[in-house]
Amino acid sequence: MINFNVNNYTIKLAENQEEIEAGLHLRYKVYCQEIGAVILDKYLEKEIEFDDLDQYCDHLILIDNSVEGQLKDKVVGYYRLIQKEAADKVGGFYSTHEFDISDFLNNYKGKVLELGRTCVLPKYRNSATMNLLWKGVAKYIEENNIDAMFGCVSAPGLDCSAYKEGFSFLYHNYSLDYSITAKDGVSMNMMKNEDIDPKQAIKNLPPLIKGYLKVNAKFGQEAFVDYDYNLTDIFVMADIKNADEKYKKHYLSVEK
């Protein structure tokens, strides 16, 4: 069971209902209050963001122990972790609601993990916080013998053209070998490769997408516009089994 401390922070898997709901409350603050996601009234009243997968998955939470108040006030980062056995109980992975990933699921030979609902409070959106979350994910991957992680990674807003240089850079340079199409998808190939400034393209991408690039991730070929969540999603997959030693040393080391 993942539970370790780094400086003032605790990174752990939620072990009880209070810890799970603290993670769901952070999702509510980020996705509903900040971004404007549309959710059912019964969850709106409870101030949680929830779907059918949540009762079967694992919830990774990042706690800032220097914050006063209830646990729900202390949880500042979150990842939802879904293995195949859990996804099968509700008819499939979350990603399949937005993308046709059958080529990947049918042909990848290894144990997979879906990451989703990633969120961090605004004041904590920096590389240090993401590194802590990545350390938790890396330990989970190690403990569960995961070969690849995948999921939907989001960019704010509904206008894909706002990310045309970044998305095109990913399309030309970090595209998956598997065919991944989005439902009513928008092609990520919006600019010619020779017209792209790589440094500027990466700079304009959301922090989480840039984080995936650090673990040699690759991406689908189309974007999904999620009107309910006011987000644009792209599919990402990282083959951890073949990750370099630099990644493993950096993220699997939790000592300070």
Image (tube, rainbow, N blue to C red):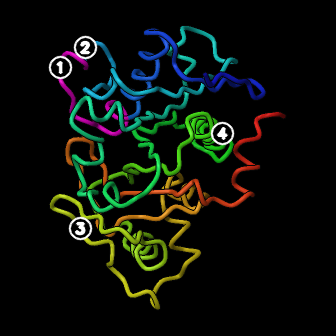
Is residue 39 shown above or below 252? above
Find residue 145 and report its horizontal and vertical position in percent: 57, 40
Residue at (23, 31) in percent of width and height: 90
The numbered mark, 4 or 1, whose residue comes first in the sequence reads 1
Query: What kind of element bears circle 3?
Result: strand
Left or right: 143 as drawn, with respect to 22: right
Query: What kind of element bears circle 2?
Result: helix
Query: What kind of element bears circle 4?
Result: helix
Query: What kind of element bears circle 1?
Result: helix
Left or right: 256 as drawn, with respect to 204: right
| Foreground: disc 4 or disc 1 | 4
Q: CB of mark 2 within 8 Å of CB of mark 1?
A: yes
Which of the image's four quarters has the N terminus?
A: top right
Residue at mark 1: 41
Residue at mark 4: 135
- 156 vs 79, nearest the viewer: 79
Q: Amino acid at mark 3?
A: Val
Residue at mark 2: 45
Q: Amino acid at mark 1?
A: Asp
The numbered mark, 4 or 2, whose residue comes first in the sequence reads 2
Mark 4 nearby-residue class (10 Å; few <14, some 14–19, many ≥20): many
In the picture as drawn, the residue positioned furthest to the left comes out as 184
Q: CB of mark 4 within 8 Å of CB of mark 3?
A: no
- Tell me where the magenta segment starts and ends, as one range: 31-43
CA distance for labels 4 and 3:
33 Å
Q: Which mark is residue 186?
A: 3
CA distance for labels 3 and 2:
34 Å
CA distance for labels 1 and 3:
31 Å
Mark 3 nearby-residue class (10 Å; few <14, some 14–19, many ≥20): some
